[in-house]
Amino acid sequence: MFMQIAIGAIGIGIVLMVGYLVIAQVRTALPTTLTANPCYGGEVVGECVDNTSQYVEDTTVSDGMDSTQATVFAGFGLVAVGIIVLAAFGLINIFR
């Protein structure tokens, strides 16, 4: 039973690591997304801190990529846990 759990954790971790590599490559391939600056040419008040740029960078895509990469980092932990459990299972069988 422990071996099945460890192999499952390693499998999930490998899938998440491949996902991490895909997300990292997509992030570098995507161009910077620009949106119209609602503060352009107006007064600098409240949330309007930049009234000199006609376009501002849209951070929703990069924020989504950050959260996806944070989730994928859990895959590295699953691989580590799976390897530790497999090693412990092997040591138990050796000394049994």
Image (cartoon, rainbow, N blue to C red):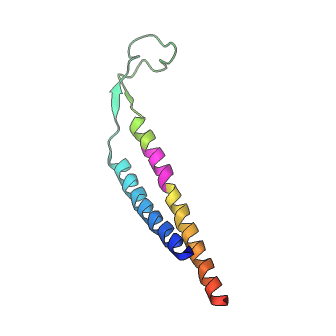
Residue 68, compared with residue 19, is above or below; it is above
Residue 68 placed where, x, y %? Answer: 45, 48
**Quadrant for the C terminus in the image:** bottom right
Looking at the image, is 79 positioned above or below residue 30?
A: below
The quadrant where residue 33 appears: top left
Residue at 52% in and 57% down: 74
Considering the image in quadrants, where does the N terminus appear?
Answer: bottom right
Residue drawn 41% across the image and 16% down it: 39
Residue 94 in picture, x, y percent from top left: 63, 89
Q: Is residue 68 magenta?
A: yes
Residue sitting at the far right: 95
Read off the magenta span: 65-72
Q: Position of residue 77 (x, y in %)?
A: 55, 62
* Residue furthest top as drawn: 43
Q: Is residue 78 left or right of residue 65?
A: right
93, 46: nearer the viewer: 93
Pick the front one: 33 or 61? 61
